[in-house]
Image (cartoon, helix red, strand yellow):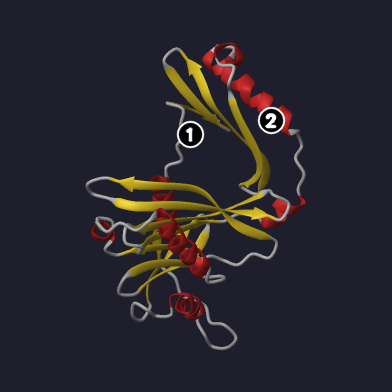
Amino acid sequence: MRLTKNKKIVTSICVSMALMVGGISIGSVLAQSSKGESKYDLVKKELSDKVQNKYGEIKERKVVDMDEKKLLEAEDDKYIYKARIDNGKIATIVAKSYEKLVKAQKHVSKDKIQSIADEYLSQFSSKTQNSKYKLGKYNFKNTDNEKVHEFIYYVVASNGVKTGESVAIEVTNDGELVLLATHDGNEKIALEATPKISQKDAEKISIDYIKTKLNEDLYATDTKLSINSELSVWEDKLVWIVKIDDIKLGDTRYGFDS
């Protein structure tokens, strides 16, 4: 559970992406398949099919570990890719000239930028049978050093439960992809698991926790408390995600998520 000041619940896109992009280099001998292909060849084919070798030949760099999974790090002239060796699924894409690209001064409308981000999502994300991608968060980072549009898409199962899978995409002000990072989920749990406590009980637990944390009666201090909760998969478990905004104590506003 986390309490944050100034009303906003901040999920740091940059920090999350940095964690997803990072990896530890390890030595590895890639196994051969029954057809005589190495696992690298299989990953390379998956990457080539998605990128279509638009930026030159894709070449391997090294094998890395991330979240107990082995990934092949590869590159072409424009991007560095990390993809899972077992199925070729892309984990991250990072532009080599990220710092230069995010300084682009061109201005493309938000609607156009979102359609471009949707195209990148369709091109690089994994396909789902009983779920669909929904845009969950959008932010335009507009500073002297960076002008970049940040999107986070969540995968939602057919029953409305989030699977825990998400895709973060960064697009420059002129529509170029500079970063893509994925987080795995579990569609089976989203579709089949049932919550052990009710939505009302989950919200009460969260409110009681904040009251204890702040030593205040929240409803007495703010009669317009904003509470939103939903089911989602987290670390292969079905959980209630509870977000509470507009907690006002004096001149300070708080936000809370659990």
**Marks 1 & 2, CB-CB < 8 Å contact:** no
- Name which residue type carries label 2: Ala
Residue 156, position as x, y percentages in the image: 64, 53
Can I make out residue 205 in this image? yes
Badge 1 marks a residue whose secondary structure is loop
Q: In terms of depth relative to the viewer, which is nearer, 116 or 40?
A: 116
Residue 244, position as x, y percentages in the image: 57, 28
Q: State which tag comes first along the sequence, 1 or 2.
A: 1
Label disc, if present, on residue 202 of the rendered structure: 2
Residue 102 relative to residue 153: left or right = left
Residue 214, position as x, y percentages in the image: 52, 15
Distance CA(mark 1)–CA(mark 2): 18 Å
Q: In terms of depth relative to the viewer, which is nearer, 33 or 47?
A: 47
**Residue visible at 34% across and 53% down in the picture:** 148
Residue 88 relative to residue 98: left or right = right
**Residue visible at 25% across and 57% down in the picture:** 99
Q: Which quarter of the rendering shows the N terminus?
A: top right
Q: In terms of depth relative to the viewer, which is nearer, 120 or 114?
A: 114
- Name which residue type carries label 1: Ile
- Identify whether 186 is placed above or below 234: below
Label disc, if present, on residue 9 of the rendered structure: 1
Residue 191, position as x, y percentages in the image: 74, 53
- Identify whether 196 is placed above or below 56: above
Label disc, if present, on residue 20 of the rendered structure: none
**Residue visible at 51% across and 54% down in the picture:** 67
Dividing the picture into quarters, in which one does residue 61 lie?
Answer: bottom left
Mark in the foreground, 1 or 2: 1
Q: Mark 2: few, some, or many residues within 10 Å (few <14, many ≥20)? A: some
Badge 2 marks a residue whose secondary structure is helix
